[in-house]
Amino acid sequence: MLASSDFADAVRLVELRGKFMQEAVPEGTGAMAAIIGLDDASIAKACEEAAEGQVVSPVNFNSPGQVVIAGHKDAVERAGAAVKPLAQNVRCRCR
């Protein structure tokens, strides 16, 4: 069982997590998009159809009706474009 950590330990862990995430995907190849107002199944289907040999999938179910997708930039953009007419809002963040 883990003992409680102090604030400095928590900050260091967050810093390391960010570093590892940055190293996992080269600059310019990844993206995330928040999709609001569309059901989970429709989002998953759009991701599957938009993949075209790349990776894009739902990665965070924030709340009912708000899902974040992530993967290769081009695939995320294709999935976002596919759901945009059906969703209330689509916000993309590319790196």
Image (spheres, rainbow, N blue to C red):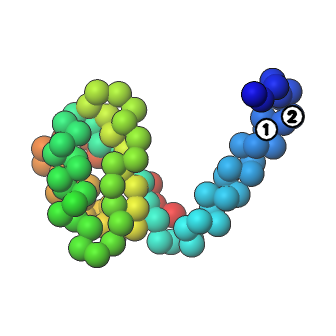
Q: Nearer the viewer, residue 83 or 4?
A: 4
Amino acid type of the residue tagged 1 in the rendering: Val
Residue lying furthest top:
4
Residue sitting at x 78%, y 35%: 10
Residue lying furthest left:
86
User: Is there any visible trace of residue 11 in the rendered image?
Assistant: yes
Q: Which residue is mark 2?
A: 8
Q: At which x and y percent is residue 52?
A: 24, 73
Number of other residues with Cα within 10 Å of mark 2, as a class: few under 14, some 14 to 19, many 20 or more:
few
Q: Which residue is mark 1?
A: 11
Amino acid type of the residue tagged 2 in the rendering: Ala
Mark on residue 20? Answer: none
Number of other residues with Cα within 10 Å of mark 1, as a class: few under 14, some 14 to 19, many 20 or more:
few
Image check: 18 left or right of 88? right
Q: At which x and y percent is residue 45?
A: 17, 53
Residue lying furthest bottom:
53
Q: Secondary structure at mark 1?
A: helix
Spatial CA span between label 1 and label 2: 5 Å
Q: Marks 2 and 1: in contact by CB < 8 Å?
A: yes
User: Is there any visible trace of residue 92 in the rendered image?
Assistant: no
Q: Is residue 92 above or below residue 73?
A: above
Image check: 17 left or right of 66? right
